[in-house]
Image: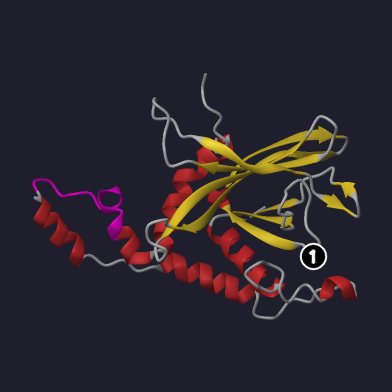
Amino acid sequence: MALFTPNVKSIHYQNYADRWTKIQTLLNGEDGIKAAGELYLPKLSGQTDDEYKAYKARGTFFNAYSRTVSGLTGAIVRKEMTVKTDAKIDKLLGSITLAGESVQEVTRMVLDNIISYGYYGILVDMAPTPEGGKVADGNPYWALYDCASILNFETVQKGDENKLVMLALAEVTYEKDSQNPLLLIAVDRVRLLQIDDKGFLVVKIYVKKKAASEKGEEIWAQEGKDLMPQIRGKRLDFIPFVFFSAS
């Protein structure tokens, strides 16, 4: 039996992955282009490895793409946007993410990603309780996901609305190495949000294990219990995620 892998990519992801890689390379400028090697700078006929290395080192790349993205984003946010909301929400906008970014800073990040990649997403989340199952008291926050982090999704037609019923988001956390507390090890996670058969939201967190199966397959295990987000004691019947695109 095949192992469950929560990081399966959607058709949309597969169709655009190569373009996103190229865009990221362009944004990284000359260093990115040179690091990509023969992908964008093929060897000349008969060149040795040393000759190619010198040939690549002599090359230059004018990063017009990155400058264009920065210029367009700057032109849009040249004047700070006006947000109209009530006082309770307004006081949250100065620090709307766990990293403390304001709504103005998040807006710039969204614009920057839409102009460069054409795709972005924001999840409204809250911290879970230590025992799992429910969310803790406190303020909600925005969790930001770039194009490469939105792995998969599913929508169904509900009247005039396309309702999001499944969403898989890639995340990375860092844990201290057991042998060296100064060394941080990246741990891949997938946040799977689904509307269950009763119409309520269930969130599962999966963690990628270091060891692979005997067949070389990735091994994923659920971390903690299922989370069942609520608002004022009532379970959510939707996935609080917004897609942003160029259109």
Q: Magenta stretch: give its range.
A: 34-46
- Magenta stretch contains residue 39: yes
State the residue in front, 24 or 144: 144
Residue at image x 59%, y 71%? Answer: 73
Q: How many marks?
A: 1
Give how far across and how far down residue 202 sits, in percent. Answer: 75, 40
Amino acid type shown at disc 1:
Gly
Give how far across and how far down residue 91 sits, in percent. Answer: 81, 76
Give how far across and how far down residue 135 sits, in percent. Answer: 78, 54
Residue 9 visible within the image:
no
Q: Quadrant of residue 75?
A: bottom right
* Residue at the top extreme, as displayed: 1
Secondary structure found at label 1: loop
**67 shown above or below 39:** below
Disc 1: CA contacts within 10 A as few (<14), some (14-19) or many (>=20): few
Q: Quadrant of residue 27?
A: bottom left
**94 shown above or below 23:** below
Residue at image x 83%, y 74%? Answer: 90
Q: Is 236 placed left or right of 219 in the picture?
A: right
Residue 142 visible within the image:
yes
**43 shown above or below 105:** above
State the residue in front, 216 or 151: 216
Q: Quadrant of residue 6?
A: top right
State the residue in front, 238 or 72: 238
Q: Which residue is mark 1?
A: 138
- Magenta stretch contains residue 22: no
SS majority, magenta:
loop
State the residue in front, 35 or 114: 35
Give how far across and how far down residue 156 sits, in percent. Answer: 77, 33
Q: How is the image coloured?
A: secondary structure
Q: Is 176 placed left or right of 112 in the picture?
A: left
Residue at image x 34%, y 69%? Answer: 62
